[in-house]
Image (cartoon, rainbow, N blue to C red):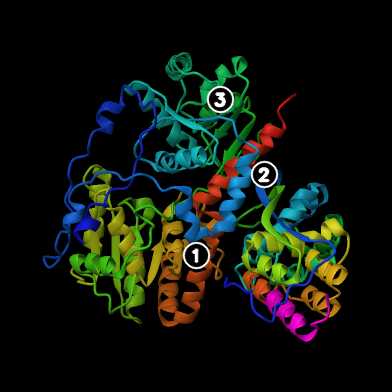
């Protein structure tokens, strides 16, 4: 167990030029946040008290046992036609968030395949990042009034980055809206420009989208995470589902002794059914709704409820939600609420693996990678039909979609009493992830896109 | 998959080797979308053949692990988003193996939806929760390291290629060959004279088996044929 404790932190590899005025403090080690067990009998696992040193990212061959050699051969063949081509990825942060996590794995794998890939992070002051955060919220449908001053700040920082960076690569991939104005460098470059949009643009603030759209339409192609997240554009649009890394701390296979240790530490009884939701303490994840569903189901079936997440200690709203959750849980010893620090990927992995059923009863969701994680672990999953979740859960085939607390409660009862059906859902769900939502599938999509754009290169 | 080499699998030379290929696909998000059956009809008439291919032939590959309950995206949408189980059943009955062109598949689906709307006029404009988003697949054909010069090598290739390769030769081949057959059956028939095995392989039901199940059935059929027809080379 001691050796495993050293692996607790999610692996991160810094991009080659992480220069960023704001990133000094962001890159520093986060403060140690102890786990908050809700019962006296729950110990604090030593492994989750502080982050440990990162380990090197996996090599391509490490995935052979998961996807098979035939799939790896396909990747190598696809990369063969691109040998000598170079790629640059540009985003706005080197640590934290799903994009940086994905690039940490994607960049070394593409390079190993003979497609040298360089990752750069844009710099900006607090004023820039406050604006881009507001853009982010507005693109999800929030209110925002765009002023000429705001436009100027956005464009000025992009211009500074354009002057600092070189764009000699054959493929330049710009992630999300923050660096979108780098497209102004396009005229002096020979490469193909791709905009990878990781956010849901189904209902954007018109002013912000009206400002960004002319930039986006100068790219050669755009990529969205779901057809429902896309806009009508004059450029080709491709579908890249978000992905998980099956070899990461959060998703790798675990020895049962680790799962047992984590459950023992948190006071979870593995001899009884366990229903789990993993998500930060946020009202949009409806943790109180999950407790109500559990309480309804518990009138018919015995089970425990685990609500594992974070965000309560560094976010005032998260703390308020945690209070609401604690109040809703009352004195039920079978409701286990865990406020975990962000480096507890291994513990989350173990909790998901220990679960009989995983729930994601969000009121609103992006793609919902916690659903992907649960499906990958072969868990029967009940989730709301919101955001990208219906891409992952085909109702009654790869999981169960619900629309209400009552529906969630019924499905908990049904799956806990129909284990054969539940197991089949879990099995199908795992195959669905293997086919569509793994990092290696993502690598294949990038290689295919580069080939397609490369073929369109004028002679 | 286990290695399938055995004493009974005597190598048989074929005149032409079988080259196992595979295909990889990238999805484009199309311009068409439908929020009711009327819009579905309109989009079906104008969308590209790549789009019809994606939502019928290709989606079968994406969901190769499901043994029952999934046929094509149109049927799934009619059931889950439109709540029209009668239409869903009819659409699910569209068997891609009967078609040698995407245009013919399109016409069949159009006919089913048109007839359903005629019989159920209120369904035409009924708004649905989740729109149907038309996508299209860009296809890249890739070689694999497996080449069969004999039946034993053929069985070995079947056992080791990806399910994408099985789908490529067994399902998508119809569009290339313009025959209601597949690459495996054609090769067995023309190069090894295992006509009955070729026929049996072509009859494997892809709608009640996973693609791994299809693979296992094929291997079983070929191994049996070799044992029963030892002089077939």
Give the numbered dot on residue B28.
2
- Residue receiving disc 1: A430
Residue A288 among those drawn in magenta = no
Residue A62 is left or right of residue A293, and the answer is: right
Camera-nearest residue between B184 and A255: B184
Q: Residue at x 52, y 21 (%)?
A: A182
Residue A278 to residue B151: above or below: above
- Residue receiving disc 3: A169
Say if labels 1 and 2 share a chain: no
Q: Chain of mark 1?
A: A
Residue B89 in percent (x, y) is at 73, 72
Q: Kindly state the secondary structure of the residue where label 3 is placed.
A: loop
Camera-nearest residue between A191 and B148: B148
Q: How many marks?
A: 3
Residue B213 in percent (x, y) is at 64, 74
Quick one: label 2, few (<14), some, or many (20+) residues within 10 Å?
Answer: many
- In the rendered structure, which segment of residues is drawn in magenta? B217-233
**Sequence-first tag of 1 and 3:** 3
Q: Is residue A261 visible?
A: yes
Q: Residue at x 73, y 25 (%)?
A: A458
Residue A170 in percent (x, y) is at 59, 27
User: Of tags 1 and 2, which is closer to the observer?
Assistant: 1
Structural distance between the alpha carbons of marks 1 and 3: 37 Å
């Amino acid at each position: 167990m001691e050796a495993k404790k050293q692996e607790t932190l999610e692996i991160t590899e810094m991009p080659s030029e992480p220069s960023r005025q704001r990133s000094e403090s962001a890159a520093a080690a986060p403060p140690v946040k102890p786990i908050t067990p809700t019962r006296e009998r729950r110990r604090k696992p030593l492994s989750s008290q502080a982050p440990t040193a990162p380990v090197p990212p996996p090599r391509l061959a490490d995935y052979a046992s998961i996807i098979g050699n035939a799939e790896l051969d396909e990747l190598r063949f696809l990369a063969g036609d691109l040998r000598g081509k170079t790629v640059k990825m540009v985003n706005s942060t080197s640590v934290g968030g799903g994009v940086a996590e994905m690039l940490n794995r994607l960049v070394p794998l593409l390079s190993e395949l003979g497609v040298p890939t360089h990752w750069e992070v844009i710099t900006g002051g607090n004023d820039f990042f406050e604006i881009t955060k507001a853009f982010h919220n507005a693109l999800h449908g929030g209110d925002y009034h765009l002023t000429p001053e705001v436009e100027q700040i956005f464009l000025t920082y992009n211009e500074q980055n354009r002057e600092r960076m070189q764009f000699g690569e054959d493929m330049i991939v710009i992630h999300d809206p923050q660096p979108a104005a780098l497209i102004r460098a396009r005229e002096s470059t020979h490469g193909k420009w791709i905009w990878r949009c990781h956010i849901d643009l189904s209902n954007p603030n018109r002013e912000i989208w009206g400002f960004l759209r002319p930039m986006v339409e100068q790219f050669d192609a755009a990529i969205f995470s779901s057809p429902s997240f896309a806009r009508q554009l004059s450029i080709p649009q491709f579908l890249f589902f978000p992905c998980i890394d099956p070899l990461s701390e959060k998703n790798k296979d675990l020895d049962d002794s680790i799962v047992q240790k984590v459950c023992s530490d948190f006071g979870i009884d593995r001899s009884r059914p366990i229903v789990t939701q993993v998500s930060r303490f946020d009202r949009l994840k409806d943790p109180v709704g999950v407790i109500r569903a559990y309480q309804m189901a518990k009138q018919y079936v015995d089970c425990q409820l685990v609500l594992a997440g974070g965000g309560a200690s560094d976010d005032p709203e998260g703390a308020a939600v945690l209070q609401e959750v604690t109040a809703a849980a009352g004195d039920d010893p079978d409701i286990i609420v865990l406020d975990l620090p962000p480096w507890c990927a291994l513990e989350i992995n173990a909790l998901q693996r220990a679960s009989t059923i995983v729930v994601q009863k969000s009121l609103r969701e992006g793609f919902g990678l916690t659903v992907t994680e649960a499906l990958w672990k072969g868990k029967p999953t009940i989730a709301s039909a919101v955001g990208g979740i219906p891409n992952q859960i085909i109702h009654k085939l790869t999981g169960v979609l619900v629309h209400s607390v009552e529906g969630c409660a019924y499905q908990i009862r049904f799956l806990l009493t129909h284990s054969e059906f539940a197991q089949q859902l879990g099995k199908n769900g795992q195959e669905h992830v293997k086919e569509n939502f793994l990092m290696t599938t993502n690598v294949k999509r990038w290689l295919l896109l580069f080939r397609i754009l490369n073929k369109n290169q004028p002679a | 998959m286990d290695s399938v080499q055995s004493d009974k699998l005597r190598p048989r030379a074929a005149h032409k080797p079988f080259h196992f290929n595979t295909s990889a696909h990238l999805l484009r998000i199309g311009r068409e979308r439908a929020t009711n059956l009327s819009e579905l009809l309109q989009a079906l008439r104008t969308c590209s053949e790549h789009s019809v291919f994606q939502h019928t032939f290709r989606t079968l590959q994406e969901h190769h692990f499901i043994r029952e309950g999934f046929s094509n995206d149109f049927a799934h949408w009619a059931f889950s988003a439109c709540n029209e189980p009668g239409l869903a059943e009819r659409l699910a009955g569209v068997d891609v193996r009967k078609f040698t062109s995407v245009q013919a598949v399109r016409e069949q689906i159009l006919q089913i939806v048109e007839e359903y709307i005629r019989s159920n006029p209120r369904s035409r404009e009924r708004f649905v929760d989740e729109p149907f988003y038309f996508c299209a697949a860009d296809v890249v054909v890739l070689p694999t390291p497996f080449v069969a010069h004999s039946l034993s090598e053929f069985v070995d290739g079947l056992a080791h290629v990806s399910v994408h390769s099985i789908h490529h030769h067994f399902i998508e081949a119809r569009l290339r060959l313009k025959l209601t057959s597949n690459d495996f059956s054609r090769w067995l028939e023309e190069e090894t004279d295992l006509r009955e095995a070729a026929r049996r392989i072509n009859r494997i039901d892809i709608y009640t088996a996973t693609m791994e199940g299809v693979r296992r059935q094929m291997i079983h059929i070929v191994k049996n044929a070799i044992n029963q027809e030892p002089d077939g080379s």
